[in-house]
Amino acid sequence: KAGVTQTPRYLIKTRGQQVTLSCSPISGHRSVSWYQQTPGQGLQFLFEYFSETQRNKGNFPGRFSGRQFSNSRSEMNVSTLELGDSALYLCASSLILEETQYFGPGTRLLVL
Amino acid sequence: GENVEQHPSTLSVQEGDSAVIKCTYSDSASNYFPWYKQELGKRPQLIIDIRSNVGEKKDQRIAVTLNKTAKHFSLHITETQPEDSAVYFCAARNQGGKLIFGQGTELSVKP
């Protein structure tokens, strides 16, 4: 089976812009989680989706949002970008909730 | 609040030696504890995991132990090799279902 894929792999934006990142889970996986990885904060949980519903949310401002489609693909959106949003954004998929998560390669976002 | 502490933050060993990384979690209801290895520029890869009803699990040179009473779990790598060099993350799934990660340990195995 193909692994988790994420697009785009790299992105450069300026402050105030918005960005949408995409994640395609492993075929058959119905749960998708998103994480922000930075050198100082490690892996921080953003949110988790299952069957098109947000099941869990981390401690991030409302500028961070996401959604999941009927084919389990997921997108996350960050509005009004700030310099501090520069990070590697990882998604992970699992068969169902609370099962082993497999990570995608990430999208590296740089905000100038 | 929910927290996973991981130590040490960096670890340097000679090839062939053992390496041990320790994590402590705060939510006593946590029930699942995976370990991920992340090589430079690559995605985190699951290397081993353990559930709360098991005290120890082993897979070749890698083992994980869990002490629920003390709320800590450890990763043991024996006979380390240069290709074991990477950042290792522990995680704990809390009662709410969130996977909380430790800050990571950068392991360096010197030939």
Image (cartoon, rainbow, N blue to C red):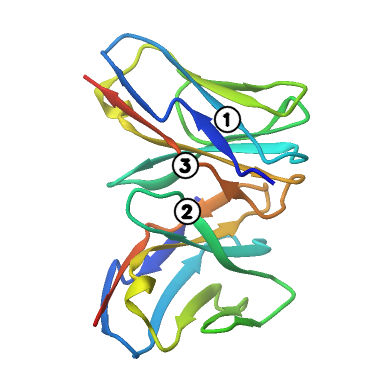
In what element is the residue under mark 2?
A: loop
Secondary structure of the residue carrying numbered label 3: loop
Q: Nearer the viewer, residue A46 or B26?
A: A46
* Chain letter of the residue carrying label 2: B
Residue highlighted by disc 3? A105
Compute the Cα span from label 2 to label 3: 8 Å
In the picture, the disc for residue B33 is none
Question: Which of the two labelled residues, at mark 3 and mark 1, occupies the earlier sequence position?
Answer: 1
Q: Give the quarter of the image for residue A96.
A: top right
Q: Note whether residue B2 is visible.
A: no
Q: Identify the residue at image location x=66%, y=27%.
A: A73
Around disc 2, counting alpha carbons within 10 Å, would you say few (fewer than 14), some (14 to 19), or many (20 or more)?
many
Dot 3 surroundings within 10 Å: few (below 14), some, or many (20 or more)?
many
- Residue B53 visible at all: yes
Residue at 55% of width from left, 78% of height from top?
B70
Q: Position of residue A64 (x, y in %)?
A: 48, 22
Residue at the limit of the structure toward the front, as seen here: A1
**Circle on res. A23:** 1
Does residue A53 lie above or below B22 as drawn?
Answer: above
Q: Position of residue B1 (x, y in %)?
A: 50, 50
Q: Residue at x 63, y 54 (%)?
A: B94
Q: Point out which mark residue B44 bears.
A: 2
